[in-house]
Image: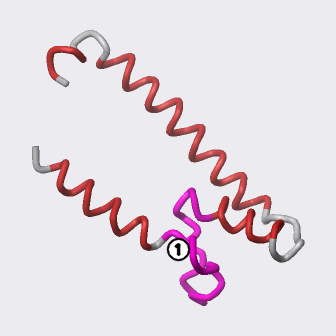
């Protein structure tokens, strides 16, 4: 039951560390740490193409795609595992 509150706090901090209103390059040496958030490379790619007229960094874009695919497959597998008792417990 307490996990709900921990997830809430974690997601709140994750939102503030996502470079929406700033570029990841502004944080200097912490840039790669900021880009570990799978949403951040996508926002940086949009900024690079729309504002700076440059090609996005394909390595970070592939990282975001890999994380999304991993979460999709993992979420589906977890759902299939818990599907039988899903209505009774959740």
Is-magenta flag for residue 89? Answer: no
Q: Quadrant of the C terminus?
A: top left
Q: Position of residue 72 (x, y in %)?
A: 53, 33
Name of the residue lying farthest toward the left: 1
Q: Quadrant of the N terminus?
A: top left
Q: Position of residue 49 (x, y in %)?
A: 83, 66
Residue matched to label 1: 33
Q: Quadrant of residue 23?
A: bottom right
Mark 1 Cα shell of 10 Å, populated few (<14), some (14-19), many (≥20):
few
Residue 25 located left or right of residue 47: left
Q: Position of residue 35 (x, y in %)?
A: 58, 68
Q: How is the image coloured?
A: secondary structure
Q: Residue shown at 56%/73% (left/top)?
A: 19
Q: Quadrant of residue 7?
A: bottom left
Is-magenta flag for residue 34? Answer: yes
* Magenta highlight range: 18-40
Q: Residue shown at 41%/65% (left/top)?
A: 14
Residue 42 located left or right of residue 89: right
Judge by depth and name the residue closer to the eye, 59 or 89. 89
Name of the residue lying farthest toward the top: 84
Give above or below for 61 relative to 86.
below
Q: Circle 1 sits in a helix, a strand or a loop, which is it?
A: helix
Number of numbered markers: 1
Q: Residue shown at 35%/69% (left/top)?
A: 13
Q: Position of residue 24 (x, y in %)?
A: 62, 79
Q: Residue shown at 75%/60% (left/top)?
A: 59
Give above or below for 43 relative to 74.
below
């Amino acid at each position: 039951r307490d996990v709900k509150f921990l997830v809430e706090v974690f997601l709140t901090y994750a939102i503030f560390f996502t470079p929406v209103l700033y570029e990841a390059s502004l944080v200097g040496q912490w840039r790669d740490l900021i880009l570990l958030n799978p949403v951040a490379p996508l926002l940086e790619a949009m900024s690079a193409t729309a504002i700076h007229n440059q090609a996005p960094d394909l390595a970070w874009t592939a990282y975001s795609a890999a994380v999304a695919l991993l979460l999709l497959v993992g979420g589906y597998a977890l759902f299939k595992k818990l599907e039988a008792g899903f209505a009774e417990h959740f």
